[in-house]
Image (cartoon, grey):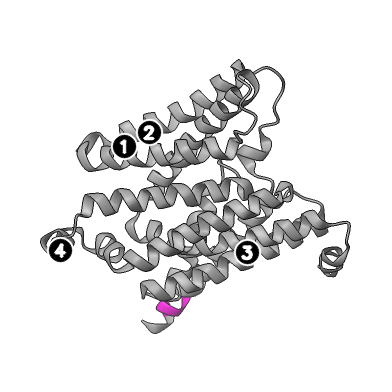
Amino acid sequence: MTDFFFALLDPNNGFLRLALMAGTLASVSFGIMGTYVVTRRIGYLAGAIAHCAFGGIGAALYLNHRWGLTWLDPIHGALASAIIAAIIIGLVSLKAGEREDSIIGALWAIGMAMGLIFIDLTPGYFELTSYLFGDILLISPQDIFMVAGLDLIIITLTVLFHHTFQAVCFDEEFATLRGIHTAFFYILLLVMTAVTVVLLVRLVGIIMVIAMLTLPAATASTLSRRLSTIMIIAILFSLLFSWSGLALSYTLDLSAGPMIICVAGLVYIGCLGMQRLFRANGD
């Protein structure tokens, strides 16, 4: 571990400092949105949105290399497709009823398939590992500004509509009776989740995005039942997972994204075990 801290001070290791900065900035949104996702139990919707984002990555690569849109970055395509998918999936979940899981499952698969088709149509070879499994060490200064900007959007919307989101998460029927447009705020919540998913793609990839989005909040929920408290604890856990996973990956020469997820999973299992042990002793 000490090697990692010394490496951070090395002027030649700017990529490590950028990675640490990205993990720090993104942890705020992870903790906030993860709390809503866990409370509302929409992890499977977030998974579908994440996989649809891959379609946008493929489309952006295609437009970039085939049509010369050099300004178009894959992360821009991921953001656009994730937001569109969030709106579609939100409408489906509100209207489809019993067929919801089948339709969302189809969208999940179609998003991945379209991404692969676009990549097949794009000239050249592309390394997809960083998109599927993440590579926080490839974060650029431009990515930092994007993460900070998207972070600001999430925080602003949360401050403005926290009580409304809380009502939608805990008691949608009561919120509707109070005159809250629950359908609109539910879809807005999914759009915010989509933005957060795009933040996560650069860190842990599409395949493991749900774990990082849900594990910090799920771990925090073992320690508190108050939503605002869970958010704060989830942010702290996100920081812990990002920093320690990055440090371990550097020390052991392993992939950063999977290591972050492993740390998060182990801490969650440990907290869950302790919670059940305390309950058993209480009985």
Q: Name the residue under label 4.
A: 174
Q: What stretch is highlighted in magenta?
A: 276-280
Q: Position of residue 268 (x, y in %)?
A: 53, 64
Q: Name the residue under label 2.
A: 105
Query: Which kind of residue does numbered mark 1 sit on?
Result: Asp
Query: Which kind of residue does numbered mark 3 sit on?
Result: Thr
Q: Where is residue 81 in the image (x, y as percent from the top left)?
A: 46, 35
Circles 4 and 1, Cβ within 8 Å, touching? The answer is no
Q: Is residue 120 toward the left or the right of residue 20 in the image?
A: left
Q: Which of marks 4 and 2 is in front?
A: 4
Q: How many labels does the image show?
A: 4
Image height check: is 170 above or below 64?
below
Q: Name the residue under label 1.
A: 101
Q: Which mark is residue 71?
A: none
Q: Counting other residues with Cα less than 10 Å from the Cα at mark 3, is it few (<14), some (14-19), or many (20 or more)?
A: some
Prevalent SS, magenta region: helix
**CA separation, marks 4 and 1?**
25 Å
Q: Residue 24 carries which label?
A: 3
- Tag 3 or tag 2, which sits nearer the N-term? 3
Q: Is residue 35 toward the left or the right of residue 64 in the image?
A: left
Q: Counting other residues with Cα less than 10 Å from the Cα at mark 2, is it few (<14), some (14-19), or many (20 or more)?
A: some
Q: Which of marks 1 and 3 is in front?
A: 3
Task: Spot the residue most to the left.
Answer: 177
Query: Which kind of residue does numbered mark 2 sit on?
Result: Gly
- Tag 3 or tag 1, which sits nearer the N-term? 3
Q: Which of marks 4 and 1 is in front?
A: 4
- Label 2 element class: helix
